[in-house]
Amino acid sequence: MKNLNSLGQRALARRKELKMTQREAAKLAGVAHVTISQWERDETQPVGTRLFSLAKALSCTPTWLLFGDEQQNPVPASELPSTTQLTDKHRELIDLFDSLPESEQEAQLQEMRARVQNFNKLFEELLQARQRQTKK
């Protein structure tokens, strides 16, 4: 993917590469389509969980969206697996989950949500530290 100078330019280029409308991207990211438009025009920037949601919707990393790191370039759209295809890890996770009693399934979901939330907080702190360093 060519060098893009801003988060908005990277988000727009990635969305178009994925052949997605703003409404489709917004639905996947859990925001209004107007919000996607504002981000793509660099009027505002996603932060916190919205940044992670946008990255997930665009099948890329938050780091690439924020900084355009070449080593973090997203997988080309043509190489992404179909959304209906599950990897071996996904299948194993589902099989293991389904083998648990319902009460344990809920406990595992809660634990995984907490772990992801903690990871997101840590990652956000690291990104903020990196942003402070790049401003110097």
Image: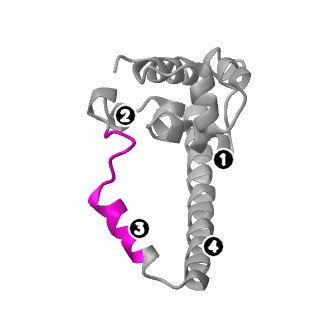
Residue 71 shows up from this direction: yes
Task: Classify mark 3: helix, strand or loop.
Answer: helix
The quadrant holding residue 136 is top right
Question: Within 10 Å of the Cα at label 1, are there few (<14), some (14-19), or many (20+) other Cα atoms?
Answer: some
Q: Earlier in the sequence, mark 4 or mark 1?
A: 1
Cα distance between the residues tagged 2 and 4: 29 Å
Q: In the image, is residue 86 part of the stretch drawn in magenta? A: yes
Q: Residue at x 63, y 23 (%)?
A: 23
Location of residue 31 in the rendering, given as x and y in whole percent from the top left corner: 70, 34
Residue at the disc numbered 1: 49
In the image, residue 66 sits, relative to residue 44, either above or below, namely below
Task: Classify mark 1: helix, strand or loop.
Answer: helix
- Name the amino acid type tagged 3: Ile
Residue 93 vs residue 45: left or right? left
Residues at badges 2 and 3 in contact (C-beta under 8 Å)?
A: no
Task: Classify mark 2: helix, strand or loop.
Answer: loop
Task: Classify mark 4: helix, strand or loop.
Answer: helix
Cα distance between the residues tagged 3 and 4: 16 Å
Q: In the image, is residue 21 part of the stretch drawn in magenta? A: no
Indicate which disc residue 110 carries.
Answer: 4
In the image, residue 124 sits, relative to residue 45, either above or below, namely below
Between 97 and 111, the one lying in front of the other is: 97
Is label 3 or label 4 in front? 3
Is label 4 or label 1 in front? 4
Residue at the disc numbered 2: 74
